[in-house]
């Protein structure tokens, strides 16, 4: 992440965050036909280099997240309904914001499948909306690269568009987004008999200009997200 304000430029290298979720499958909803899925955070740690002070500050916000759970309903076509976040008691606002971002990231990593039969090379698009300080629409285009039985390989192309210029960061003064450019790519390995991708990764680049409290700043970030059976 790089933050620029006036003639000052502050590059910050943030270590990775590894999380273990215990996933449980619940009952099938008799009305909608989808199944209940609950993912509970059992472990969290930093992955990669961090100095002692940075690591301690990050873990002070991450440790309270243990025990949080994300629940939703999942259809046979991979569509997520009614995602809910259960926050452990006593969690500070900064940690709660991280949890909300994690909920949106995890639900967006589940690729919805098209209604009609398709073959290799087919493309389809999913549109989601997120608001973690900035209100944005995310357009994800999936391409079916290969299929072997119940196993699919997908490529993803990601583009985010600003839905509203107003910033909504908890505990911060109001501000607005001056310019916004966000895009990325990823891959997913999907087993049609499972409720989550076997493996998935995405890289997202963001450039954003902000105006708040009479000051202007620019933010540049490069984020890598991965989902798999273990923390590496």
Image (cartoon, grey):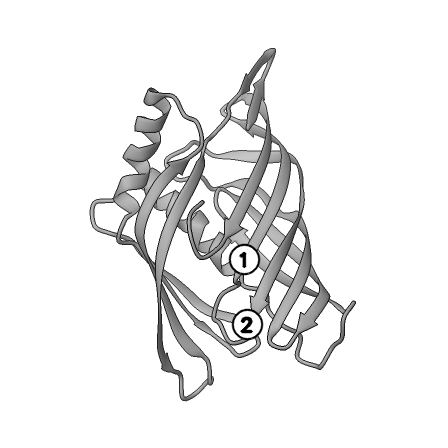
State whether residue 228 is above or below residue 12. below
Q: Helix, strand, or loop for circle 1?
A: strand
| Camera sees residue 92 | no
Q: Residue furthest bottom?
A: 30
**In the rendered image, which residue does mark 2 sit on?**
78
Picture coordinates of residue 150 (x, y %)?
60, 76
Which residue is painted at 38% across and 36% down in the image? 46
Residue 202 shown left or right of residue 32 in the figure: right
Q: Residue furthest top?
A: 7
Q: Are marks 2 and 1 in contact (CB under 8 Å)?
A: no
Q: Residue at x 71, y 67 (%)?
A: 146
- Residue mark closest to the camera, 2 vs 1: 1
Q: Secondary structure at mark 2?
A: loop
Residue 218 picture quarter: top right
- Is residue 35 left or right of 117 when viewed as pictured? left
Separation (CA) of disc 2 from disc 1: 15 Å
For disc 1, the marked residue is: 199
């Amino acid at each position: 992440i790089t933050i620029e304000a006036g003639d000052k430029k502050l590059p910050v290298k943030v270590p990775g965050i590894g999380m273990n979720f215990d996933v449980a499958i619940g009952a099938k909803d008799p009305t909608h036909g989808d199944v209940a899925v609950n993912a509970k955070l059992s472990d969290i740690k930093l992955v990669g280099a961090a100095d002692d002070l940075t690591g301690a500050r990050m873990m002070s916000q991450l440790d309270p997240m243990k025990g949080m759970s994300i629940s939703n309903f999942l259809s046979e076509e991979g569509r997520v309904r009614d995602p809910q976040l259960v926050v452990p008691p006593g969690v500070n606002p900064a940690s709660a914001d991280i949890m909300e971002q994690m909920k949106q990231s995890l639900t967006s990593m589940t690729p919805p499948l098209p209604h009609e039969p398709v073959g290799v090379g087919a493309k389809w698009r999913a549109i989601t909306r997120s608001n973690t300080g900035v209100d944005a629409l995310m357009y994800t285009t999936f391409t079916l690269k290969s299929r072997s039985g119940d196993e699919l390989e997908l490529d993803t192309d990601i583009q985010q568009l600003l839905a509203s210029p107003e910033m909504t960061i908890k505990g911060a003064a109001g501000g607005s987004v001056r310019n916004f450019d966000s895009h990325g790519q990823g891959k997913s390995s999907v087993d049609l008999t499972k409720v989550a991708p076997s493996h998935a990764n995405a890289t997202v680049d963001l450039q954003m200009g902000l105006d708040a409290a009479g000051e202007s700043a620019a933010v540049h970030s490069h984020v890598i997200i991965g989902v798999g059976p273990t923390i590496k």
